[in-house]
């Protein structure tokens, strides 16, 4: 008989032969077994808690990161804005910032850092000093901790924005002087961070007092309504005030009517032989991220000039980007 069964049988015979005395011995035996089991359970619980605590200590602490701004305009013509990354190193280790998406793998290696707060400023250039084109990137922070653990990658989406190129059309219809006091030489469309700029360059003889109206037709989709930025005198008098308005209409069509848009920030600037009108991008809420334009002007004697060039059809500038979108 196995030893366990033999002990059980012996305990049973003690109870039968000795009555209450041996019964007390049996109870004591059971209590010893219960205490042994309780001790084993306690040891198991302590070991489990110790392992859990060790695992928690091995988990890398999170890196706290802030990026400002997440969209920036680093080109000199846009103000040379820079992006700043600030992060907190929770424990000692090696830290590195990478701009994922650049051809040469732009990065900044901090080396070994002690716990604390650190920052890095990026000017939108690659490792060779070349300013990057407009693009969206992922900014990542990597760290190798002293406890031999890689921390989870911290990823922050960022965008590098740049102004669009200028594009223009010239008045080549050969009718110089046909507009009386106004002759439009070149019409230029430019986009930048401030918005969309339409510039009218006139031939010699232009005088602001002779201008009655100038309209820039801003087309954002050939199949949908576009925008008309107008500067016009209140009356036919050359002394009346010039007023800027922005409207939305189906360009060169009588269908759908015209809708006036409230637009703060529109402005007109006069030079000796030029007029520049700015429309903030936030005012142009519909349409895509590109725009093209045409122009039309008239003087106080109702002479007109501009584009279209009647006989050859309407002429537009090339399409250019306009960012940021609202």
Image (cartoon, grey):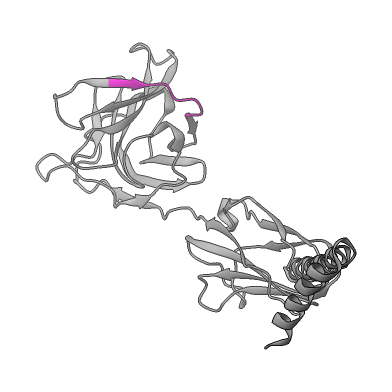
Q: Report x, y in % for residue 265.
A: 51, 29
Q: Nearer the viewer, residue 280 or 155?
A: 155
Q: Compare residues 317 and 325 and report the one nearer the observer.
A: 325
- Left or right of residue 191: residue 42: right
Q: Is any atom of residue 50 visible in this view?
A: no
Q: Residue furthest left?
A: 311
Residue plotted at (50% across, 70% down): 101
Give above or below for 297 relative to 157: above
Q: Is residue 124 left or right of residue 183?
A: right
Q: Where is residue 74 in the image (x, y as percent from the top left)?
A: 59, 57
- Residue 164 seen by the camera: yes
In percent of the image, x 37 and y 46: which residue is there? 188
Q: Is residue 173 left or right of residue 298?
A: left
Q: Which of 149 and 22 is in front in this view?
A: 22
In which quadrant of the rendered image does the N terminus lie?
bottom right
Classify 104 as above or below 189.
below
Give the total of numbered labels.
0
For image coordinates 50% across by 55% down, the residue present is 162
Residue closest to the far bottom: 1
Dominant secondary-structure state across the stretch colored magenta: loop
Using the rendered view, name the quadrant where residue 124 is placed: bottom right
Q: In which quarter of the image is the C terminus?
A: top left
Residue reaching furthest to the right = 21
In the rendering, at what x and y percent does residue 154 appear? 63, 63
**The magenta stretch spans which residues?**
259-266
User: Is 222 colored magenta in this rendering?
Assistant: no
- Residue drawn at point x = 33 percent, y = 20 percent: 260
Q: Quadrant of residue 155?
A: bottom right
């Amino acid at each position: 008989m196995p030893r366990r069964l033999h002990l059980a049988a012996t305990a049973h015979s003690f109870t039968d032969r000795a009555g209450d005395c041996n019964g007390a011995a049996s109870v004591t035996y059971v209590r010893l077994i219960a205490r042994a089991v309780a001790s084993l359970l306690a040891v198991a619980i302590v070991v489990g808690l110790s392992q859990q605590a060790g695992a928690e200590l091995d988990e890398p602490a999170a890196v706290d990161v802030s990026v400002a701004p997440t969209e920036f305009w680093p080109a000199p013509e846009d103000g040379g804005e820079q992006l700043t990354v600030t992060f907190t190193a929770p424990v000692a280790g090696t830290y590195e910032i990478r701009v994922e998406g650049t051809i040469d793998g732009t990065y900044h290696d901090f080396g070994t850092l002690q716990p604390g707060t650190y920052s890095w400023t990026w000017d939108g250039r690659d490792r060779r000093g070349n300013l990057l084109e407009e693009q969206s990137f992922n900014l990542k922070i990597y760290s190798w901790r002293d406890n031999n653990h890689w921390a989870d990658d911290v990823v922050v989406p960022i965008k590098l924005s740049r102004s669009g190129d200028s594009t223009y059309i010239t008045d080549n219809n050969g009718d110089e002087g046909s507009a009386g006091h106004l002759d439009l030489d070149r019409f230029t469309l430019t986009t930048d961070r401030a918005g969309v700029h339409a510039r009218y360059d006139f031939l010699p003889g232009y005088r602001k007092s002779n201008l009655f109206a100038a309209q820039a037709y801003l087309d954002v989709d050939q199949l949908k309504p576009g925008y008309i930025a107008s500067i016009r005198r209140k009356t036919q008098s050359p002394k009346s005030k010039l007023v800027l308005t922005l409207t939305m209409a189906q360009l060169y069509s009588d269908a759908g009517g015209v809708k006036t848009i409230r637009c703060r920030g529109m402005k007109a600037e006069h030079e000796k032989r030029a007029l520049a009108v700015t429309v903030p991008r936030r005012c142009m809420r519909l349409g895509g991220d590109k725009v093209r334009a045409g122009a039309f002007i008239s003087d106080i004697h109702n002479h007109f000039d501009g584009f279209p060039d009647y006989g050859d059809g309407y002429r537009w500038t090339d399409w250019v980007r306009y960012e940021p979108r609202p």
